[in-house]
Image (cartoon, rainbow, N blue to C red):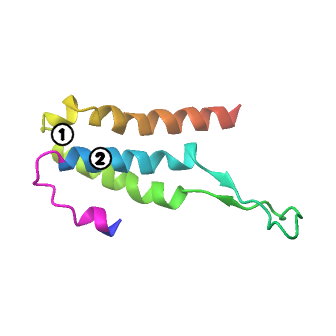
Amino acid sequence: MDTIADIDLDVPGSPSLVMRDLSDYATLPFLAAVDVQPHPRTQQPQTPQKRITYIALSKRTMPMLVELFLRFKTNVDVYVDQTLESVLSVRTISHQYLTRRED
């Protein structure tokens, strides 16, 4: 995350690229969580089952994403190069996941 904060956003196109990457990071908890497989020698299931999630990464990226979008919302590239769609997809994917869990 420190690396992203160090990117020069004055370079044309970089705000859009960073926002699209942050959008991808923010959706990881909903799309990429995986169970940890037991060690091959023991073959015993782990109790409780361990799971790799990306919740902390998502929580860290969402405020950054909002701040960047608000900062560059007047930049035409954000609307032309699918950046807006990427930003909005975070909300859509998280809403779909949470709605499915409530059923």
Is 55 placed left or right of 80 in the picture?
Answer: right
Mark in the foreground, 1 or 2: 2
The boundaries of the magenta stretch are 3-13
Q: What SS does tag 2 mark?
A: helix
Secondary structure mostly taken by the magenta-highlighted segment of the chain: loop
* Rendered image quadrant of residue 2: bottom left
Where in the figure is residue 9, as x and y percent of width and height? 15, 55
Residue corresponding to mark 2: 19
Where in the figure is residue 27, as x and y percent of width and height? 48, 45
Q: Is residue 1 magenta?
A: no
Q: Is residue 5 magenta?
A: yes
Q: Quadrant of the N terminus?
A: bottom left
Residue type highlighted by circle 2: Met
Residue corresponding to mark 1: 73
User: Residue at 37% of width from left, 34% of height from top?
Assistant: 88
* N-terminal label among 1 and 2: 2
Is 102 placed left or right of 21 in the picture?
Answer: right
Q: Most extreme residue toward the front, as rendered? A: 41
Q: Quadrant of the C terminus?
A: top right
The total of numbered circles placed on residues is 2
Distance from Cα at disc 1 to Cα at disc 2: 11 Å
User: Residue at 28% of width from left, 32% of height from top?
Assistant: 82
User: Residue at 36% of width from left, 50% of height from top?
Assistant: 22
Residue type highlighted by circle 1: Lys
Tell me if mark 2 has few (under 14), some (14-19) or many (20+) residues whose alpha carbon lies within 10 angstroms of its own. Answer: many
Q: What SS does tag 1 mark?
A: loop
